[in-house]
Image (cartoon, helix red, strand yellow):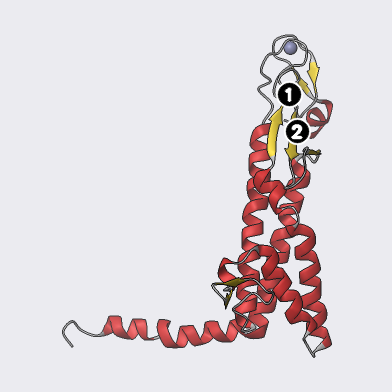
């Protein structure tokens, strides 16, 4: 499909009626529109966003590990012991990073950490929307729409964003995950990796070269 035809809509193969590009069925006769990949577009976009959120959470966990933080800073405990970070909610990991950021004495590092915190909060706020939102298809027009019921709310809110905009959120999340990764590498991740190579990877060829039984 060319860009022009995508903007103009999809022509029905049965009645030649014109339908909006986000429809799966013809609005005039109900025939399936074979040019529409709308559902697949949503699957890819929402899936990408969830995977990117998971990467971000994993990188934040790694950064905290490099900063020698292993427990949730706030009051949540497990049988009276501080809650280990690994099983904590994403928001708790971010709250912990925020706490660590405020205690930094290096202003440049503090700024970088705080920027990560505010971006992660802004983008992470969508986690439940992407994980629990519903993709709803209008039976008459074939139009796709996402709805999300926030916990504690009585009715759902429409998320009118098309897959292209959700893909953009996924891109921003991946970008942030890479920023977190870079900082972690800078703060000791690289050193840890080199140490790992020295200790575990380098002896391997030497071990391989040893004749059997030596
Ligand atoms: Zn039609």
Q: Nearer the viewer, residue 47 or 3?
A: 47
Q: Considering only vertical position in the picture, is 87 above or below 70?
A: above
Q: Identify which residue is drawn at 67% across, 31% down.
A: 37
Q: Considering only vertical position in the picture, is 36 above or below 160?
A: above
Quarter the C terminus occupies:
bottom left
Quarter the N terminus occupies:
top right
Q: Which mark is residue 85?
A: none
Q: Which mark is residue 138?
A: 1
Q: Regarding mark 1 in the picture, which secondary structure is present there?
A: loop
Give residue 80's position: percent from left, percent from top.
57, 76
Decide if ligand 1 comes within 8 Å of the CB at mark 1: no
Q: Considering only vertical position in the picture, is 160 above or below 61?
A: above
Q: Nearer the viewer, residue 59 or 64?
A: 64
Q: Quadrant of residue 92?
A: bottom right
Farthest bottom residue?
Answer: 105
Q: Regarding mark 2 in the picture, which secondary structure is present there?
A: strand
Q: Quadrant of residue 160?
A: top right
Q: Nearer the viewer, residue 128 or 29?
A: 128
**In the figure, is residue 81 to the left or right of 72?**
left
Q: Which mark is residue 145?
A: 2
Give residue 36's position: percent from left, percent from top.
69, 27
Q: Considering only vertical position in the picture, is 2 above or below 30?
A: below
Distance from disc 1 to disc 2, alpha carbons, whole Å, reads 8 Å
**In the figure, is residue 180 to the left or right of 207?**
right
Q: Are marks 1 and 2 in contact (CB under 8 Å)?
A: yes
Q: Earlier in the sequence, mark 1 or mark 2?
A: 1
Give residue 9's position: percent from left, percent from top.
80, 25
- Disc 1 packing (10 Å; few <14; some 14–19; many ≥20): few
Q: Nearer the viewer, residue 57 or 168?
A: 57
Give residue 70's position: percent from left, percent from top.
59, 79
């Amino acid at each position: 499909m060319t860009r022009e035809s995508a903007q103009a809509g999809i022509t029905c193969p049965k009645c030649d009626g014109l339908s909006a590009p986000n429809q799966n069925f013809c609005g005039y006769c109900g025939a399936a529109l074979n040019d529409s990949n709308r559902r697949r577009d949503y699957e890819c976009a929402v899936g990408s966003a969830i995977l990117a959120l998971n990467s971000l959470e994993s990188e934040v966990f790694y950064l905290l590990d490099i900063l020698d933080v292993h427990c949730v800073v706030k009051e949540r405990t497990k049988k009276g012991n501080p809650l280990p970070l690994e099983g904590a909610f994403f928001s708790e990991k971010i709250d912990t990073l925020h706490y660590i950021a405020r205690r930094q004495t290096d202003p440049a590092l503090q700024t970088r950490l705080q920027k990560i915190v505010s971006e992660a909060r802004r983008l992470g706020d969508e986690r439940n929307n992407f994980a629990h939102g519903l993709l709803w298809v209008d039976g008459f027009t074939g139009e796709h729409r996402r709805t999300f019921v926030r916990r504690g709310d009585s009715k759902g809110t429409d998320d009118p964003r098309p897959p292209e905009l959700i893909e953009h959120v996924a891109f921003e999340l991946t970008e942030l995950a890479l920023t977190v990764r870079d900082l972690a590498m800078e703060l000791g991740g690289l050193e840890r990796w080199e140490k790992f190579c020295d200790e575990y990877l380098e002896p391997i060829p030497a071990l391989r070269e040893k004749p059997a039984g030596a």
